[in-house]
Amino acid sequence: MDSCKAEKMPNTSSNPKVQKSIALPSSKFLFKGFYNTIEFEHSMANGQVKKVSIPLIDESGLIFSKCKSAQVPKRPRDSYDIFLALKQPNVDSTIDRLKSASKSFPAVKESVSSLLSFVEDEKSNFSYNIYKYTNDRDPEEHREYCASKLREVVNA
């Protein structure tokens, strides 16, 4: 999916334009099942109803896609997004998918390892970034929780 060049492909019903919105050096793994497909019906301008499928990134893909940006001071919400992804009921599946991707795509393990270093650094703004959005819990507890989950990936 990510290898298509939309500007060079004709937009026909048998060959629709496809563009990736995640421009990462190793985003290929995201298109190997690290998304959920949402389907719905859409009313076209001509009155026809068309079934539409949209791939949405899953939690493991979200974490990978934000590993670097969460470390950027101007992107505090990315730390919170990672925290939320790790707090979902399917966290074990998310960690398993990241472990699997780390074995097939070295850049995934490198990125998660870099994120783990950032999260473990008590001087980083990771805890504060979470606190800014939760405001009701101990951010250090959240930092430790996230670090423990990321360690599972890095140490696999």
Image (spheres, helix red, strand yellow):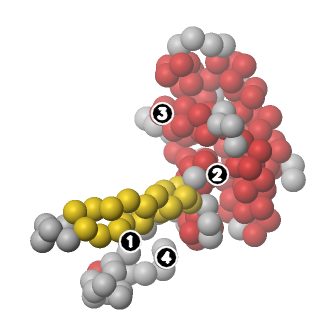
Q: CA distance from mark 3 to mark 4?
A: 28 Å
Asked whether 111 or 82 is in front, the reply is 82
Residue in the image at 50% along x and 19% along y: 132
Q: Residue at x 50, y 61 (%)?
A: 37
x, y percentage for residue 134?
Answer: 53, 19
From the image, tell me which residue sits under label 3: 77
Disc 1 versus disc 4: distance between alpha carbons? 8 Å
Q: Residues within 10 Å of mark 2 (few under 14, many from 20)?
A: many
User: Is residue 143 shown to the viewer in this render?
Assistant: yes
Q: Amino acid at mark 3?
A: Arg
Label disc, if present, on residue 44 of the rendered structure: none
- The Cα atoms of the two marked residues, 2 and 3, are separated by 17 Å
Give whichever of discs 2 and 4 has the lower sequence position. Answer: 4
Q: Residue at x 38, y 71 (%)?
A: 19
Q: Which residue is mark 4?
A: 1
> What label sits on residue 19 in the rendered view?
1
Q: Say if mark 1 contacts mark 4, CB within 8 Å.
A: no
Disc on the earlier residue, 2 or 1: 1
Residue assigned mark 2 = 60
Contact, mark 2 vs mark 1 (Cβ under 8 Å):
no
Seen in the picture, residue 144 relative to 98 is either above or below; the reply is above
* Earlier residue among tags 1 and 3: 1
Q: Earlier in the sequence, mark 3 or mark 4?
A: 4
| Residue 114 drawn at (x, y percent) | 69, 47
Report, in whole angstroms, how far the alpha carbon at label 1 lies from the one at label 3: 25 Å
| Label 2, label 4: how far apart the Cα atoms are | 18 Å
Label 2 with label 4: CB-CB less than 8 Å: no
Name the amino acid, label 4.
Met
**Quadrant of residue 107 within the rendered picture:** bottom right
